[in-house]
């Protein structure tokens, strides 16, 4: 019985803690759920409400424990630095009301059921107006739901399918348009070249730009071959894929996976003596690539990037200056600011831009819908610019493709060389993907 | 047994709600569950409904593993069979309520196929065979069933007489109804002749065969029934989600299901499953809320709690509950 | 064509030997405790993270290997002491559930060491290659394969040629009988777990060399679980055969898959399922593995 | 009475959690003697030996009352390896040898337990020479008699002072049984061990034993020097299968059941 009493006590304690967590919401940032209505209620919506503040809740869905947690961690650092930075600097609606963002961070471990669960929590418990999200599959499968619930969704996935969804935004060309830029670059380098497309044939993210690449290649007279490269490739699987690619004697390789398998494929290509330039998509190539490939890939490895990386950009240029300031404020060293960090920062910044284009009343009454319309006002009105990081961005209803140009980044053995920006011409890459897949 | 209550027939003794307190608490629970959307906030209601989906799946696995002793690590894949069937049917205009039983039967059919290895294998080997089945089905989903990674569910098929079953109270009541029916049936399976045959097979299948139980049939049924529940849960998942992603049905999810059964209490089909689900799935979410965005503590605490309870209570959390119940029954004079 | 196949097979043999080393940990624990040790994938992950941290701090690969072995052994012994020993004599499912708990803990520790998540990184860089006709072997191939095969061979030799190894086998076969003859069963059981941890640590380095450290490293360990069964659980030789067969099947399927199309079905990535298909067939027709001894059921 | 090598005083054994198996058993094994515990299946012979050797722990059982004194020390509820280290070795019923390993490996494994104490692996071959010919054979392929010999041989490696033999005759052909008992007798004489022997085969056991206890349903119902037991009417009838002078075996058996004269 003594033991029963102990266990009973333990259970009571657990229940109390859990209940407290449920009721109070646990961490500090979200202790004021859905208070956006309080302050502005007293404030008439007409402009000039300087001095007033309101709070909004934003969901922040991240992967810190799943298969993409490595880049996820950097992305989270950047986004959190941005939340902190803009909150402290002050975010003002167009009528001058200061907005404070409470973000609710949830690690869903790249598991869709968890994403769905946390989405419901964001919506029903915190009544969020926007979500800063992560992967392709979860964002795509939630997109219809967010449209119905009228929640702005800014994801780290740049899938073409999201371009036509009413509530999904991102500050980049979609994967297809980026890939088309890569194909255009390849055609420039070597007309009539053969491109082997290495990607996991089973994964939405990897497959996403393939129809567009094929359409673009056909237009530019390049030959393409499909090769399956598993997203979870080890060296042996990567070698098999490279051997398969070598059968068609390619001049270029496109790697559509994430950096893990792309770097192993580059290593395998170096080992097997395939003399072709690999261009990986945006999540397949970053500062760590040469180290991960751990082989001589100089001049033969590169990737697409819609923006100049912080490591090569002028830190005092507009946009990059804010980026580095935010990093400094959050306690990071300048060399810790990498591409993934910047991607997180940019997504939050885009949200801030949306808030700055709404009025307090609009935001309070219509929430996500107001933010969506604020971003879409860039279609006809003044374009959105995240400093010099992006060119002018215009989001139009039914077409959330903000701009089309991308850089091609090549590792030359010592540094990353940026070519471009290149804007793919002649093919509607988004349309090609939507129709092809 | 409470004092003053006497059972005169075997039928009474085996009754489902044997004692007045059972009847009262069942009534109270029913009233509470029915009134919940009026009492609690939307978030809790939706979340509870979402957990019920997985509860149905865990109950199914508890029948296969707990009652019949057939270790299965393919449960998530079976859930997938139901989910995809339901989603596919809705895309062809079939109402989700009609799609649910079809989904369950589809999974049951697949599950019966998966019972084949169990006729010859046990323990570790059977577990491995089910892992193989899980991975094969996963490949089929990835490549052939849902090559776009997810299959959308038709929202128009989730309406019943103008009530939207995919959100709010509609979703809650629809899920609740299915879950309660499923749990009720499951609790009764354990007390039926089939349930006893399953337990006999679990405890010693050679002896069971000798006393005249058709072991092959019982094993096949154990898989069929367990998979039926998995399929039902898959159908419910289609009701809850706007798209069915194959990453819902990974080996990891299957392992999680097994952990829920073992941690909760294998063989205690309803209560054990509920406790296991609460400990692992709800526990994970709550830890995530407490240490938001820091998965390290979530893993450490959850893992330590599981290991601790299993070592201290190898029969699962249900044994803890029994102990607590016993303690409270005698409280404050525990001797 | 035929020449082509050879290089696929060689690749398969190399990765297969790593699978064998990864499977060894499952096998040793299964034999001594009669249960799947679900903590093993996380143990391998932890050892790989530790090795990576040691290597990236500039201590060199040898230090990385040593650190991985030490951490693997320590973690394994801790699981034995805290979980397996108190559960001795309980049904195997208890141990399965409890090691799942240990899996979470070890994964949490790995993430903590990695600074909040599992880092991504390579353990060994070299451009050195060896060409033997159509077959190209890289330094990573030789390193991983020799580490893996060395691990398996060392464990096999320990089990066969040393008294303590023979005693460990005796305990694994019949702990009760061993106790009756005065063997220190507890100590030998703990030693077996430690050995599983050491093997896990070495295998962790091998797989991290072949596949880089990444959050998906565990996936290979699960795959190795399949290898542990392919040839039956009784012998270390079985593990080697199982691992190699698995590796070669994967590679052959990769070789064949692009050419096969049945109606609307194509087989890209089928190698991930092919190994399991073979395993299922083996289990259906040879229930105790290709070389496993059939057990006679007694009531 | 001089203190015996092993004294079991009024012990009770329970298995987890409440199953009472032995109730109030007392057994005395003097140094340099063979004591036989006789009784039918399920009487508790094995439990008694397990309780002495400590192996009962592995079955989640324990000695709940009474004491077991070996060489002046209490050993009840100790770990099995602790007990065996004191020289008490238990040869488990049913030829518990390591069937997946060769004879040599069996010897090597058990010798590991006694390393540093001057183990002589040849002692096995000395008493059981035919094992030498088969030393490279997997034990699973040995005959039942050879396995039993190996089991006893392995126990010898420990140089035991007290050997607990559990049913060495179980499932063996009569000729082999005699051979096994021959060897037991021989090692008793040459190795100076004390033997506590549990047997159903009362005839064989009483041939070599000095003293015997008869155990039924967890209680000792009769004990005495071997020669007296051999002459006892009931023992002769029920254990040795010799029909009594009065005849009418079945009727008398019923009478015996009714009368329970030993209780």
Image (cartoon, coloured by chain):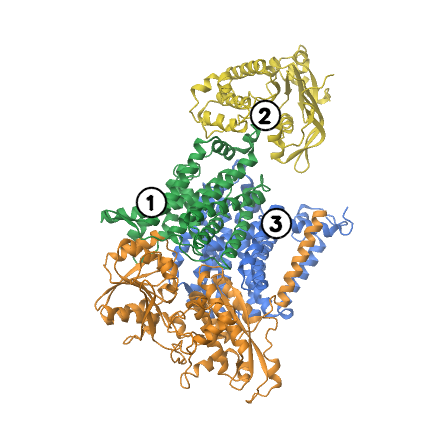
Number of numbered markers: 3
Q: Are marks 1 and 2 on the same chain?
A: no
Regarding mark 1 in the picture, which secondary structure is present there? helix
> Relative to residue A106, is residue B228 depicted above or below?
above
In the rendered picture, chain C carries what hue? Answer: green
Pick the front one: C111 or A227: C111
In the rendered picture, chain A carries what hue? Answer: orange
Q: Quadrant of residue A158?
A: bottom left
Circle 2 residues within 10 Å: few <14, some 14–19, many ≥20: many
Report x, y in % for residue A220.
Answer: 24, 71
Pick the front one: A208 or B152: A208
Direction from residue B215 to residue C260 in the image, left or right? left
In the rendered picture, chain D carries what hue? Answer: yellow
Report x, y in % for residue B104.
Answer: 48, 57
Residue that numbered label 2 is attached to: D90
Label drawn at residue B309: 3
Q: Residue at x 56, y 62 (%)?
A: B288
Q: Residue at x 59, y 25 (%)?
A: D89
Q: Are marks 2 and 3 in contact (CB under 8 Å)?
A: no
Residue B274 seen anywhere in this rendered image of the structure: yes
Direction from residue B249 to residue C126 in the image, left or right? left
Mark 3 belongs to which subunit? B
Regarding mark 3 in the picture, which secondary structure is present there? helix
Mark 2 belongs to which subunit? D
Residue that numbered label 1 is attached to: C13
Find the residue positioned furthest to the left. A192
The blue chain is: B
Direction from residue A266 to residue C123 in the image, left or right? right
Regarding mark 2 in the picture, which secondary structure is present there? strand
Q: Residue at x 47, y 43 (%)?
A: C198
């Amino acid at each position: 019985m003594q033991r029963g009493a102990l266990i009973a006590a333990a259970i009571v304690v657990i229940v109390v803690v859990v209940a407290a967590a449920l009721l109070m919401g646990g961490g500090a940032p979200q202790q004021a759920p859905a208070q956006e209505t309080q302050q502005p209620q007293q404030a008439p919506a007409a402009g000039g409400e300087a001095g007033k503040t309101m709070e909004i809740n934003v969901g922040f869905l991240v992967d810190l424990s799943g298969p993409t947690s490595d880049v996820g961690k950097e992305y989270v650092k950047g986004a959190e630095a941005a939340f902190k930075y803009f909150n402290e600097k002050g975010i003002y609606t167009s009528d001058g009301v200061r907005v404070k963002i409470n973000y609710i961070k949830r690690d869903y471990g790249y598991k869709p059921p968890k994403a769905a669960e946390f989405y419901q929590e964001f919506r029903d418990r915190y009544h969020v107006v926007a979500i800063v999200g992560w992967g392709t599959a979860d964002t795509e499968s939630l997109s219809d739901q967010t449209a119905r619930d009228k929640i702005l969704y800014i994801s780290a996935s740049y899938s073409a399918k999201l371009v036509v969804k009413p509530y999904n935004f991102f500050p980049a060309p979609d994967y297809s348009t980026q890939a088309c830029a890569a194909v255009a670059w390849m055609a420039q380098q070597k007309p009539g070249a053969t491109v082997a497309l290495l990607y996991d044939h089973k994964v939405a993210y990897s497959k996403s730009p393939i129809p567009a690449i094929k359409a673009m290649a056909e237009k530019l007279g390049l030959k393409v071959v499909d090769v399956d490269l598993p997203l979870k490739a080890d060296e042996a699987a990567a070698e098999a894929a490279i051997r398969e690619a070598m059968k068609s004697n390619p001049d270029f390789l496109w790697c559509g996976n994430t950096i893990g398998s792309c770097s192993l494929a580059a290593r395998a290509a170096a080992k097997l003596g395939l003399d072709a330039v690999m261009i990986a998509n945006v999540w397949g190539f970053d500062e760590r690539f040469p180290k991960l490939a751990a082989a001589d890939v100089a001049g033969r490895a590169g990737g697409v990037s819609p923006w100049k990386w912080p490591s090569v950009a002028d830190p005092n240029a507009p946009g990059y200056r804010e980026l580095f300031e935010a990093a400094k404020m959050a306690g990071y060293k300048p060399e810790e600011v990498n591409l993934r960090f910047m991607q997180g920062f940019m997504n939050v910044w885009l949200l801030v831009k949306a808030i700055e284009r709404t009025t307090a009343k609009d935001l309070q009454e219509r929430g996500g819908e107001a933010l969506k319309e604020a971003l879409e006002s860039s279609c006809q009105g003044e374009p959105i610019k995240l400093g010099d990081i992006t060119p002018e961005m215009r989001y139009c209803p039914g077409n959330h493709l903000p701009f089309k140009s991308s850089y091609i980044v090549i590792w030359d053995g010592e540094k990353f060389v940026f070519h471009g920006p290149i804007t793919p011409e002649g093919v509607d890459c988004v349309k090609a993907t939507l129709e092809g897949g | 047994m409470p004092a003053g209550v006497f059972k005169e027939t075997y039928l009474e003794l085996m009754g489902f709600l044997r004692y007045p307190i059972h009847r009262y608490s069942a009534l109270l629970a029913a009233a509470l569950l029915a009134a919940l959307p009026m009492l609690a906030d939307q978030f809790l209601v939706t979340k509870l409904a979402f957990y019920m989906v997985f509860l149905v799946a865990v109950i199914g696995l508890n029948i296969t593993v707990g009652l019949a002793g057939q270790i299965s690590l393919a449960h998530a894949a079976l859930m997938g069979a139901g989910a995809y069937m339901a989603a596919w049917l809705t895309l062809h205009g079939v109402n989700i309520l009609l799609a649910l039983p079809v989904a369950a039967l589809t999974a049951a059919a697949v599950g019966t196929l998966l019972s084949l290895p169990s006729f010859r294998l046990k323990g570790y080997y059977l577990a491995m065979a089910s892992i193989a089945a899980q991975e094969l089905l996963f490949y089929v989903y990835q490549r052939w069933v849902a090559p776009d990674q997810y299959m959308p569910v038709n929202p128009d098929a989730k309406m019943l007489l103008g009530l939207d079953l995919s959100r709010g109270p509609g979703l809650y009541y629809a899920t609740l109804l299915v879950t309660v029916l499923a749990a009720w049936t499951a609790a009764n399976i354990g007390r039926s002749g089939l349930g006893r045959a399953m337990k006999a097979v679990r405890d010693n299948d050679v002896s069971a065969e000798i006393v005249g139980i058709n072991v092959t049939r019982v094993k096949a049924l154990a898989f069929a029934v367990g998979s039926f529940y998995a399929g039902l849960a898959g159908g419910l998942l289609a009701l809850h989600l706007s798209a069915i992603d194959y990453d819902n049905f990974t080996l990891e999810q299957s392992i999680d299901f097994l952990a829920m059964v073992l941690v909760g209490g294998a063989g205690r089909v309803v209560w054990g499953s509920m406790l296991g689900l609460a400990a692992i799935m709800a526990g994970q979410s709550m830890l995530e809320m407490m240490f938001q965005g820091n998965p390290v503590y979530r893993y450490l605490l959850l893992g330590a709690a599981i290991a601790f309870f299993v070592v201290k209570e190898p029969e699962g959390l249900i044994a803890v509950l029994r102990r607590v119940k016993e303690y409270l029954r005698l409280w404050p004079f525990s001797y | 064509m035929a020449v082509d196949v050879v290089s696929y097979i060689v690749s398969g043999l190399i990765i297969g030997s790593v699978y064998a080393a990864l499977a060894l940990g499952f096998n040793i624990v299964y034999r001594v405790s009669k249960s799947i040790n679900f903590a093993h994938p996380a143990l391998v992950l932890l050892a790989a993270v530790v090795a990576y941290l040691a290597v990236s701090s500039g201590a060199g690969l040898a230090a990385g290997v040593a650190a991985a072995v030490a951490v693997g052994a320590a973690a394994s012994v801790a699981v034995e002491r805290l979980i397996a020993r108190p559960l001795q004599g309980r049904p195997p499912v208890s141990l399965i559930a409890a090691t799942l708990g240990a899996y979470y803990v070890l994964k949490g520790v790995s993430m903590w060491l990695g600074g909040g998540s599992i880092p991504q990184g390579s353990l060994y860089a070299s451009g050195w290659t060896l060409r033997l006709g159509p077959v190209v072997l890289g330094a990573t191939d030789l390193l991983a394969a020799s580490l893996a095969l060395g691990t398996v061979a060392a464990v096999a030799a320990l089990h066969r040629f040393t008294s303590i190894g023979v005693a460990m086998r005796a305990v694994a076969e019949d702990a009760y009988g061993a106790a009756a003859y005065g063997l220190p069963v507890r100590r030998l059981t703990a030693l077996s777990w430690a050995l599983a941890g050491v093997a896990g640590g070495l295998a962790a380095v091998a797989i991290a060399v072949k596949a880089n450290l990444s959050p998906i490293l565990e996936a290979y360990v699960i795959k190795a679980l399949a290898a542990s069964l392919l040839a039956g659980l009784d012998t270390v030789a079985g593990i080697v055969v199982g691992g190699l067969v698995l590796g070669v099947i994967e590679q052959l399927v990769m070789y064949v898959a692009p050419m096969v199309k049945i109606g609307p079905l194509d087989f890209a990535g089928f190698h991930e399922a092919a190994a399991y298909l073979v395993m299922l067939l083996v289990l259906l027709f040879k229930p105790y593995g290709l070389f496993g001894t059939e057990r006679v059921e007694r009531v | 009475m001089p203190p015996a090598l092993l004294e079991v005083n009024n012990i009770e054994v329970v298995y987890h959690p409440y199953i009472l198996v032995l109730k109030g058993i007392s057994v005395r094994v003097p140094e340099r003697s063979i004591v036989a515990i006789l009784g039918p299946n399920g009487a508790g012979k094995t439990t008694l030996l397990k309780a002495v050797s400590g192996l009962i722990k592995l079955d989640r059982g324990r000695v709940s009352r009474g004491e077991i004194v070996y060489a002046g020390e209490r050993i009840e509820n100790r770990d099995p390896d602790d007990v065996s280290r004191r020289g008490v070795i238990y040869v488990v019923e049913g030829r518990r040898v390591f069937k997946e390993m060769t004879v040599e490996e069996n010897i090597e494994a058990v010798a590991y337990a006694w390393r540093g104490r001057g183990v002589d692996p040849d002692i096995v071959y000395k008493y059981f020479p035919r094992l030498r010919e088969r030393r490279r054979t997997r034990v699973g392929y040995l005959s039942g008699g050879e396995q039993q010999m190996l089991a006893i041989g392995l126990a010898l490696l420990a140089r035991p002072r007290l050997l607990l033999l559990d049913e060495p005759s179980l499932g063996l052909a009569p000729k082999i049984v005699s051979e096994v008992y021959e060897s037991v007798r021989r090692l008793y004489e040459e190795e100076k061990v004390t033997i506590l022997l549990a047997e159903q085969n009362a005839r064989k056991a009483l041939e070599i034993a000095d003293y015997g206890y008869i155990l039924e349903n967890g209680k000792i119902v009769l004990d005495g020097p071997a020669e007296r037991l051999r002459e006892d009417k009931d023992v002769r009838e029920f254990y040795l299968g010799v029909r009594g002078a009065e005849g009418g075996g079945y009727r008398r058996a019923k009478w015996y059941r009714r009368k329970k004269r030993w209780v």
